[in-house]
Amino acid sequence: MIQETSQKSIIVVLGMHRSGTSVVTRIFNLLGADTGKNLMLPAEDNPSGFWEPVEIVAVHDELFQHLGYSWNDPRPLPYKWWQRPDIKVFEDRLLQLVKQHYADIDLPIIKDPRLCRLLPLWHRIFNKLGWKAHYVLVGRSPIEVADSLSKRNALSTSHSHLLWLRHVVESEFWSRENPRTFLLYNQLFESWQSEIKRCKRELGLKKLRLSKSRELEINDYIDRSLRHSKIPQESIDTASDISLFVSDAYSQFKQAAISGLVETKLQARFDSISRQVMNADRLYSSIWLPSLGQRDAATANMAELENERKVNKADIEHDRGLANVFQTQHDELLGKVQSLSIRVGEGEAVSRELDRKHEEYISCK
C-alpha cells in the first residue's frame, strides 16, 4: 500500500463517458472526498447527478474546440498539444478555477470524462500547486457504453468503441507513476463494499473512511442509481462488431481491476495496444483527413448561415418592433377619432334640440 504523505492530495476520477464515473465520484464523496461547489445539475440521462464542476467542464470544451475537436471526437490529439504557447491561457484559467474551488478543501475530488484525454495539461497544474494526484480509473464494457451513447447521442457503435478506446488507453498512460486503482462499474452491482475497500487500500488515502452510517447511505445510493441500468448480456468475446484493440484493452482493464496486474506487465500490454492503434491511425489518416477538411468547411458554412439567420432574425424583430409601434400609434389615433366622432354626434344632437326649441318658440309667437 502506498504511504500517505503530508503533501496535499486530490482524487481524480477517470473513465469514458457513460462508464459510471458519476456513481463512483459520489461514493468517494460519501467516504470523505469533497467535490466542491457549482456542480453540473442532474439531467434526464443522469438523474442522480454528474458531480462535475460546471466551469471546469466548460473550459475543457473550449479547449477541445480550440484544438479543432469535441468531446466525442475519437481522433488522436495533436502531438504534445499541451506544450503549445496558445494553450497557456487554458492552463491559467484551469489553475485559477482549481484554486478557487479546491484550495480550501482538505481532500478534493474532481471528475470529468474529458480529463482522460487532457491529463498532460493537468499534470502541469498539479505540479504548480504541489498537489499529489490519486487516480481512480473506472471501466465499463464498451458494448454497454456504445448502447448508452447510441440512445443518448445517436453515436454509431464503431464511433463509441473508438472513443472508448482513446479514453481508456490515454487515461492508463497518463496516470502512470501515480497512486491509482482500477474499478469495474459492473462490480459495484455485486460487491461494492469489497471493491471500494480495495480501492481505498490501493490509493493509500487514510482520510477516506467508511462508517456504518455511510455504508447504509452508499448502499441506498447505489441501489437508486443502478437498479434501472440494463446490462446487455452479449459477451465481448462473441461480439462480431468489436475491434481486437477494444476487446484487448477491456480484457487488460478487467485483469487490472480483478486480478491486480503488476504495473510493469499492465503497462507493457497497454503500450502494445497503443502502438497498434498508432499504426492504424497512420494508415487511415490519409482517408479521414480529407473528410475532416470537408467537415470543417461544412461547419464553417453552417456557422456563416447561422450568422445570416441571426442577422435576418434581428431584422425581422426590428421590423416587428416598428410594426408594433405603428400599430400602437394607429390604435391611439383610432381611439381619438372615435372619441371625436362621439363628441360630434353629441354636438349634432344638441344642435337638433336647439333647432326644435327655436321652432317651438317661433310657432308660439
Image (tube, rainbow, N blue to C red):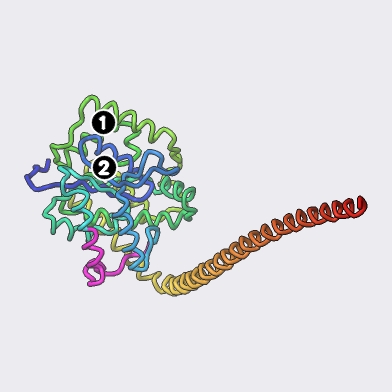
Relative to 182, is 164 on the left or the right? right
**Residue 280 in view here:** no
Q: Of the residues shown, which amino acid type is indicated by label 1? A: Gln
At horizontal 47% and vertical 70% (from top left) the residue drawn is 303
Q: Callout 2: helix, strand or loop?
A: helix
Q: Residues within 10 Å of mark 2 (few under 14, many from 20)?
A: many
Whether 197 is among the magenta residues is: no
User: In the structure shown, which secondary structural element does the residue marked by tag 1 occupy?
Assistant: helix
Q: Quadrant of residue 188?
A: top left
- Nearer to the camera, 136 or 97: 97
Question: Seen from this angle, which residue lies furthest front?
Answer: 365
Q: Which residue is mark 2?
A: 257
Task: Find residue 337 and report its horizontal and vertical position in percent.
Answer: 70, 60
Seen in the picture, residue 271 relative to 205 is either above or below; the reply is: below
User: Mark 2 belongs to which amino acid?
Assistant: Ala
- Disc 2 and disc 1 in contact, CB within 8 angstroms: no
Q: What residue is disc 1 on?
A: 193
Tell me which segment is drawn in magenta. 74-94
| Viewport quadrant of the N terminus | top left
Residue depth check, mark 2 versus mark 1: number of the one nearer the observer: 1
Of helix, strand and loop, which mostly describes the magenta segment?
helix
